[in-house]
Image (spheres, rainbow, N blue to C red):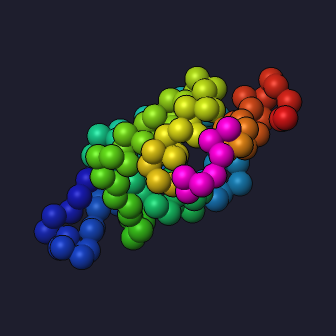
């Protein structure tokens, strides 16, 4: 929870979070990893796509597992990012393309967004994206 009495335009103060930092060996032992991963993914996407904000310093030292091992709490919001409506759409389309394994569409979105110079090849970039994406799925060899 935000502690509004101790927060200002440049300082965010939140309530204390009890739990175990993920830097602690065995911190996730006994936790439902699949549920926690799904919760983190939903939280990130909701914050980024719906509200345009994201925690830009996510690492195990900034994540605390609740005492009941049912939820992850993010701390240290010293570095935050903000994305506008167009970037949110690009992000959503790129993620959707990866989930559908439509690397050509992912590549096209990168070009539409201006992330890749127009002088480059969409097909070559799509192949490079496939080289990144397919090993993640684990059931197809990298080209």
Count of residue discs? 0
Location of residue 23 (image quadrant): bottom right
Q: Find the magenta span and give its range.
A: 117-123
**Residue 35: x %, y % from top left:** 54, 29
Q: Residue furthest bottom?
A: 10
Q: Is residue 60 left or right of residue 142?
A: left
Residue 112, magenta (yes or no): no
Q: Residue furthest left?
A: 5
**Residue 114: x %, y % from top left:** 47, 53
User: Which is more toward the observer, 5 or 139?
Assistant: 139
Location of residue 30 (image quadrant): top right
**Residue 43: x %, y % from top left:** 40, 40
Q: Residue furthest front?
A: 119
User: Which is more toward the observer, 2 or 30?
Assistant: 2
Location of residue 100 (image quadrant): top right
Is 31 located above or below residue 110 in the figure?
above
What residue appears at the point 41 percent right and 68 percent down from the top-left corner?
Answer: 79
Task: Please tell me whether the stretch drawn in magenta is mainly helix, strand or loop.
Answer: loop
What residue appears at the point 74 percent right and 32 percent down from the top-left corner?
Answer: 134
Is 75 located above or below residue 129 in the figure?
below
**From this viewpoint, is residue 3 visible?**
yes
**Residue 84: x %, y % from top left:** 30, 52
Residue 120, magenta (yes or no): yes
Is 137 located above or below residue 87 in the figure?
above
Q: Is residue 122 left or right of residue 1?
A: right
What residue appears at the point 62 percent right and 41 percent down from the top-left corner?
Answer: 122
**From this viewpoint, is residue 40 visible?**
no
User: Which is more toward the observer, 51 or 2?
Assistant: 51
Tell me the quarter of the image containing the C terminus.
top right
């Amino acid at each position: 929870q935000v502690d509004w009495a101790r927060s200002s335009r440049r300082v965010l103060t939140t309530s204390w979070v009890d739990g175990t930092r993920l830097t602690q060996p065995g911190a996730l032992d006994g936790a439902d990893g699949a549920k926690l991963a799904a919760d983190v993914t939903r939280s990130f996407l909701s914050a980024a796509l719906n509200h345009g904000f994201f925690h830009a310093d996510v690492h195990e030292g900034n994540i605390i597992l609740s005492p009941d091992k049912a939820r992850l709490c993010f701390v240290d919001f010293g570095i935050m990012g903000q994305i506008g409506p167009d970037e949110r759409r690009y992000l959503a389309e790129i993620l959707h393309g990866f989930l559908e394994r439509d690397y050509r569409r992912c590549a096209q979105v990168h070009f539409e967004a201006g992330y890749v110079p127009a002088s480059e090849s969409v097909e070559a970039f799509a192949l490079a994206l496939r080289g990144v994406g397919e090993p993640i799925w684990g059931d197809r060899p990298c080209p």
